Image (tube, helix red, strand yellow):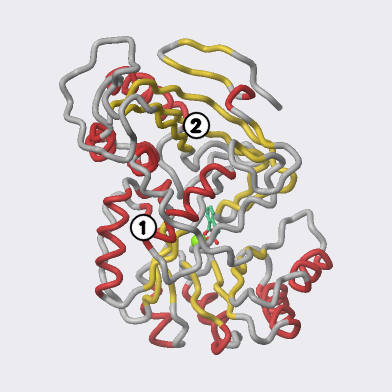
């Protein structure tokens, strides 16, 4: 297949309530939508075609396949104008500039160039986006049906009363098996009472706790000692210093998962006692091929892999749900982050408004048009 058109759009979506990014909070999300059109043989393209080989049989001659992907590094500023730290290292501006240079070079090339450029990019968000675009244009995501079950995300936004959290638990469908609860955010007393409160309402639930590296070893030991261990699936990143996770596990057999640790560009999988899961956020890690290698390595050591949201819009979350069905078919991904979004983007998820490309700012080959919503 040959790429006949590539366009880049900028979105900015206000959030109805704050979303947690570790200990920080955001009130809007910004990112890019990359739109690509490809044909089986490039015949409908009005410029000269390079001699790239056409190997794909999914699209018949002359037919145009159009796909969209979200590229949204998790960087920028929180509600207090502090830079988000610990997630994407690249800024949205850097990504936008790199793509503005790259996209004209991909014009009239085989879609396989997307994979080469994905591997070559220093930015994980671009690597993921280009490899996802390749997968979508090749029809690989069409073949799967994602799970409809979710792992609801429970957190105490600074502005929401406890009664709202209790109502959220009460409204969970009986089919929900696990919930994810943010900890190391407020006081240990409050968080333990939230955990026991959830379990008193729904004793059958398993909890995935997430401390976002928020505890010192001493705090983690104190907290873990008070937990109902039989009801805890794992705790994500319990300790400020990841090397303390092993000490914690030896003292109290609470399985743990790694999340932020994987964002280190030098992260290499190493098996440790107590390590039970990797939380895989594709937008922060890179190409699908890289994700697949990490998942294979973890699975070889009996470690679970849970695909998770980097707070993408409905477009990105829908693709992650499909990708999870392919890469981690036995796990329920952590994608319950759309509730706070005021609008959907290209893919409806049930919101009143679903933005189309026409609502966004176009940035194509230095050309800027249209107006931005907000
Ligand atoms: O993992 C999930 O279930 C939802 C996603 C999530 O919690 C998250 C999203 C963006 C940044 C950090 C985190 C986190 O795991 O703390
Ligand atoms: Mg986490």
The tag earlier along the polypeptide, 1 or 2, is 2
Residue 327 coordinates in the image, percent (x, y): 36, 60
Q: Residues within 10 Å of mark 1 (few under 14, many from 20)?
A: some
**Which residue is at the far front?**
61
Tell me the SS state at disc 1: helix
Q: Is residue 261 above or below residue 199?
A: above
Judge left or right: residue 103 versus residue 362: left
Q: Is residue 232 above or below residue 111?
A: below
The image quarter containing residue 120 is top left
Mark in front: 1 vs 2: 2
Judge left or right: residue 283 versus residue 348: left
Q: Is the residue marked 1 within 8 Å of ligand 2, measured from its CB? A: no
Locate the C terminus by quadrant: top right
| Disc sitting over residue 321 in the figure | none
Q: Residue at x 55, y 87 (%)?
A: 229
Q: Is residue 347 above or below residue 215?
A: above
The image quarter containing residue 160 is bottom right
Residue 222 coordinates in the image, percent (x, y): 56, 82
Q: Total marks drawn?
A: 2
Q: Which residue is mark 1?
A: 262
Locate the N terminus by quadrant: top left
Q: Residue at x 39, y 67 (%)?
A: 305
Q: Residue at x 40, y 13 (%)?
A: 365
Residue 133 coordinates in the image, percent (x, y): 38, 38
Q: Residue at x 70, y 72 (%)?
A: 173
Q: Which residue is mark 2?
A: 33
Judge left or right: residue 368 versus residue 99: right
Q: Is the residue marked 2 within 8 Å of ligand 1, measured from its CB? A: no
Residue 134 coordinates in the image, percent (x, y): 33, 39
């Amino acid at each position: 297949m040959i790429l006949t058109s590539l366009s880049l759009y900028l979105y900015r979506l206000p959030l109805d309530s704050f979303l947690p990014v570790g200990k920080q909070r955001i009130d809007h999300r910004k990112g890019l939508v990359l739109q690509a059109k490809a044909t089986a043989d490039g015949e409908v393209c009005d410029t000269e075609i390079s001699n790239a080989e056409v190997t794909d049989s999914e699209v018949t001659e002359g037919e145009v396949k159009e796909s969209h992907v979200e590229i949204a590094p998790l960087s920028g500023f929180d509600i207090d104008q502090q830079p988000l730290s610990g997630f994407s290292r690249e800024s949205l501006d850097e990504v936008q500039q790199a793509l503005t240079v790259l996209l004209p070079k991909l014009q009239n090339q085989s879609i396989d160039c997307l994979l080469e450029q994905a591997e070559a990019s220093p930015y994980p968000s671009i690597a993921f986006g280009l490899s996802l675009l390749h997968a979508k244009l090749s029809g690989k995501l069409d073949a799967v049906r994602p799970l409809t079950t979710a792992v609801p995300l429970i957190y105490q936004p600074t502005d929401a009363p406890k009664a709202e959290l209790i109502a959220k638990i009460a409204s969970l469908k009986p089919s929900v098996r696990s919930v994810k609860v943010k900890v190391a955010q407020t006081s240990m007393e409050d968080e333990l009472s939230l955990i026991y409160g959830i379990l008193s309402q729904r004793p059958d639930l398993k909890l995935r706790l997430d401390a976002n590296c928020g505890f010192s070893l001493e705090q983690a030991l104190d907290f873990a000692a008070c937990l109902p261990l039989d009801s805890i699936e794992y705790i994500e990143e319990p300790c400020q210093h990841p090397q303390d996770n092993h000490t914690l596990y030896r003292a109290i057999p609470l399985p743990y998962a790694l999340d932020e640790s994987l964002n280190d560009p030098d992260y290499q999988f190493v098996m440790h006692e107590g390590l039970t899961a990797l939380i895989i956020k594709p937008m922060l890690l890179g190409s699908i091929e890289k994700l697949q290698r990490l998942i294979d390595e973890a699975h070889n050591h009996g470690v679970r892999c849970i695909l998770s949201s980097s707070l993408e819009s409905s477009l990105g979350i829908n693709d992650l749900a499909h990708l999870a069905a392919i890469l981690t078919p036995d796990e329920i991904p952590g994608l319950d982050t759309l509730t706070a979004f005021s609008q959907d983007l290209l893919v409806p998820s049930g919101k009143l408004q679903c933005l189309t490309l026409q609502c966004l700012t176009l940035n194509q080959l230095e050309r800027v048009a249209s107006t931005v919503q907000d």
